Amino acid sequence: MGEFADDVHAHLRDALAARRPHREWTTEWYVGRTAVDVAGVPAGDAPLVLVEVEMRRADPANNPVKLARHAAEDAFDAPVVLVQLFSGYYALADGAASSKRENAEFVGGLATDSLAGFDYRAVDLSLSPPVRGDDPPEGWQDAVANAADRVDERI
């Protein structure tokens, strides 16, 4: 995914910064050795917003697991809202979600139920990521902007 994923992260960061300018939005934000795709660091006591963008990850459940583990270890100075964006790669032909997405949402829900100050939200990213060497899909910037609207609604 490389360069295209970086472009998506940067576009999402900028779109969220336009919607929530009171936060410092950054890409590749670290908690310990764990990189988060996009983070919105609050001013004051508002929740920290972490956004993981899942394009084609083989195990997207790993992201909420890692971040919930960090939350359980008190690695954050504020409550956390984890938003996981799922590309069209995780949608089945009949419109249902793949088991990979279902597993990630299940783990995120468990973390929300068991950890004080941790909230998980899943959001659709309505684009199908390109296969290696292919051009990015047309309209990907609009899809990211629409996803930023959904993220904004959930934080």
Image: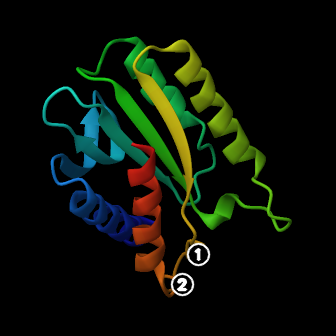
Asked if 132 appears above or below 23 in the picture, the reply is below
Asked if 59 appears above or below 146 in the picture, the reply is above
Q: What element carries label 2?
A: loop
Label 2 sits on residue: 134
Label 1 sits on residue: 131
Residue at the image position 20 percent from the left and 26 percent from the top: 45
Tell me where residue 109 sits by quadrant: top right
Query: Label 2 is placed on what type of residue?
Result: Asp
Left or right of 114? Residue 149 is: left
User: As rendered, which of 146 and 85 lies closer to the eye?
Assistant: 146
Q: What element carries label 1?
A: loop
User: Which quadrant would the C terminus be assigned to in this image?
Assistant: top left
Asked if 32 appears above or below 61 in the picture, the reply is above
Residue at the image position 14 percent from the left and 29 percent from the top: 44
Count every numbered label the image shows and give the total.
Answer: 2
Mark 1–mark 2 Cα distance, whole angstroms, equals 6 Å
Query: Label 1 is placed on what type of residue?
Result: Val
Left or right of 71? Residue 122 is: right
Q: Where is residue 91 in the image (x, y as percent from the top left)?
A: 72, 61
Residue at the image position 59 percent from the left and 44 percent from the top: 60
In this view, the residue farthest toward the right is 94
Q: Position of residue 153 (x, y in %)?
A: 43, 51
Q: Position of residue 143 (x, y in %)?
A: 48, 73
Task: Say the numbered circle drawn on residue 91.
Answer: none
User: As rendered, which of 19 and 35 lies closer to the eye?
Assistant: 19
Left or right of 91? Residue 87 is: left
Q: Where is residue 53 in the image (x, y as percent from the top left)?
A: 46, 54
The reply to whether discs 1 and 2 touch (Cβ–Cβ < 8 Å) is yes
